[in-house]
């Protein structure tokens, strides 16, 4: 069941004297899709990694529903309903699509009937991979492989899905394919989604609300419509600001 997420004063530091996140706040209602945008180096991916338990949170709170989850081991975060799809490819190319999906329910692998049903259900979610469940995942296009990763992230019935730049490195055609399927996922309203994306226009088309980060802090926020109307000035602001977080 989808639940809201509330992030308060979240700080992440890989080294004791180098903070990547410096007090980020975010609130997303259940069954919504929230886009997180900003310049390179702003801390967008680090925010997702902090929530997913793969980056060290040094201060702040992450509440999933009524439960605080910051600092929990990754296995406990998965059991709490958090699913993280990283930017880097994580498809096992020599395994079939169905076998890749099955890994998404590994923490409940003893429930064989349930897992079989979830693999079939999630394999049918996206039209682009539905016919290829028994094909090796490495034979699929880059966009299809990313959809396999997203479907795998949904197998465990998470309440929160974290998507880190799902279209990174994809061609424009594949970007449109991934976002067409994300729009269909949003229509189902079955999971809360936090989406980090550099393809800002595409992200705004599917998002309910948008947060802009810069230098590891909140910059601005608003509805997708509001941010779309202000996008040119927002981008101009983060590109012109000294120390905006842009890296070469």
Image (spheres, rainbow, N blue to C red):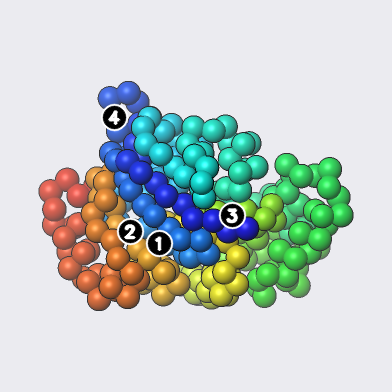
Label 3, residues with CA under 10 Å away: few <14, some 14-19, many ≥20: many
Residue at the (29%, 29%) spot, across then down: 18
- Residue on which disc 1 sits: 35
109 vs 35, left or right, is: right
Residue 89 seen: no
Q: Earlier in the sequence, mark 2 or mark 4?
A: 4
> Is disc 1 placed on a helix, strand or loop?
strand
Residue 162, image x, y percentages: 51, 53
Give SS at disc 3.
loop
Q: Is residue 111 left or right of residue 192?
A: right
Please determine whether, in this image, residue 41 is positioned above or below residue 57. Answer: below
| Residue at 39% from the left image edge and 55% from the top image edge | 27
Disc nearer the start of the sequence (3/1):
1
| Dots 1, 2 in contact, CB < 8 A | yes
| Quarter where residue 16 is shown | top left
Mark 2 → mark 4, Cα distance in angstroms: 23 Å
């Amino acid at each position: 069941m989808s639940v809201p997420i509330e992030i308060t004063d979240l700080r992440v530091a890989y080294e004791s004297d180098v903070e990547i996140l410096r007090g980020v706040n975010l609130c997303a209602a259940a069954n919504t899709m929230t886009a997180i945008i900003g310049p390179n180096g702003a801390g967008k991916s680090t925010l997702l990694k902090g929530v997913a338990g793969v980056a060290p949170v040094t201060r702040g709170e992450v509440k999933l529903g009524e439960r605080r989850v910051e600092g929990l081991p990754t296995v406990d975060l998965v059991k709490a309903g958090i699913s993280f799809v990283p930017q880097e490819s994580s498809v096992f190319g020599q395994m079939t699509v169905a076998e890749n999906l099955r890994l998404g329910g590994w923490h409940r692998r003893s429930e064989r009937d349930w897992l079989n049903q979830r693999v079939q259900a999630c394999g049918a979610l996206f039209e682009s991979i539905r016919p290829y469940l028994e094909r090796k995942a490495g034979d699929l296009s880059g966009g299809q492989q990313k959809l396999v990763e997203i479907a795998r992230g949904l197998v465990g019935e998470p309440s929160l899905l974290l998507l880190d730049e799902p279209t990174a490195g994809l061609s424009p055609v594949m970007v449109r394919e991934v976002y067409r399927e994300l729009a269909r996922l949003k229509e189902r309203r079955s999971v809360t989604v936090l989406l980090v994306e550099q393809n800002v226009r595409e992200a705004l088309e599917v998002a309910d609300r948008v947060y802009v980060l810069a230098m590891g802090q909140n910059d601005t926020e608003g509805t997708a419509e509001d941010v779309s109307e202000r996008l040119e000035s927002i981008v101009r602001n983060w590109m012109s600001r000294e120390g905006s977080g842009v890296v070469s």
